[in-house]
Image: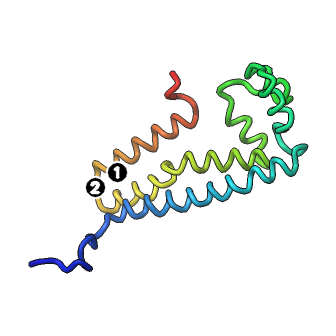
Amino acid sequence: MRQLPSERGKEEQAKAQMHYGYVVHGITIASCLIALAAPVLILSFPGANLLNPNLIFGAIFEGQSPYEIWLSAGVQFEPGDFWGLFWNGLFAPDGFAMFGIVLGCSSALWALLPSAWSYAKEKNALYLWISVFIVFLILLAMTGIINMAG
């Protein structure tokens, strides 16, 4: 039997895929709104920032090394200690910007959780374990245990 043009493309999506899409969509919108607001806050309150943008930009435009830039900012930062910097500066305007970046970059992690739950309810073991494995890889990457930089 031939389908009408209005009926084409109305195949049912898997619930796990719908959950994944809804979560990624919501988190992406939220992180984009944070990305719009954060620079205004950072430049409006430069003294309240963890890293004063005037000092950072000045050091960058002078051609200083990354180590010298961190020193001029007045923040003790060791490579690989992003989470220490993130949690210590979370309520500063630039900490709000970091939160938006972390939220947007981790959207796959948060979206895979309800998706994996759907696969578990459907008793789809293969996709459930693939989802759990990818969540595990994302968590390892976020902690810095594994990275693409080597």
Position of 40 compared to 121: left or right? right
Q: Is residue 19 above or below residue 112?
A: below
In percent of width and height, residue 88 lies at 78, 40
- Identity of the residue drawn at 79% across and 53% down: 40
- Please rate how many residues cluster around mark 2, counting C-alpha atoms within 10 Å: few if below 14, some from 14 to 19, many from 20: few
Q: Position of residue 87 (x, y in %)?
A: 73, 42
- Whether residue 128 sits left or right of residue 35 in the image: it is left
Q: Residue at x 47, y 63 (%)?
A: 22
Q: Quadrant of residue 34?
A: bottom right
Q: Which residue is mark 2?
A: 124
| Whether residue 86 is situated above or below residue 148 in the rendered picture | below
Foreground: 59 or 26?
Answer: 59
Whether residue 85 is situated above or below residue 123 in the rendered picture: above
**Separation of disc 1 and disc 2 at Cα?**
6 Å
The mark found on residue 128 in the picture is: 1
Q: Amino acid at mark 2?
A: Asn
Is residue 126 in sight in this rendering? Answer: yes
Q: Residue at x 66, y 50 (%)?
A: 100
Q: Measuring from the top left, give residue 67's x and y in whole percent.
A: 76, 20
Look at the image and tell me in which quarter the N terminus lies: bottom left
Q: Are marks 1 and 2 in contact (CB under 8 Å)?
A: yes
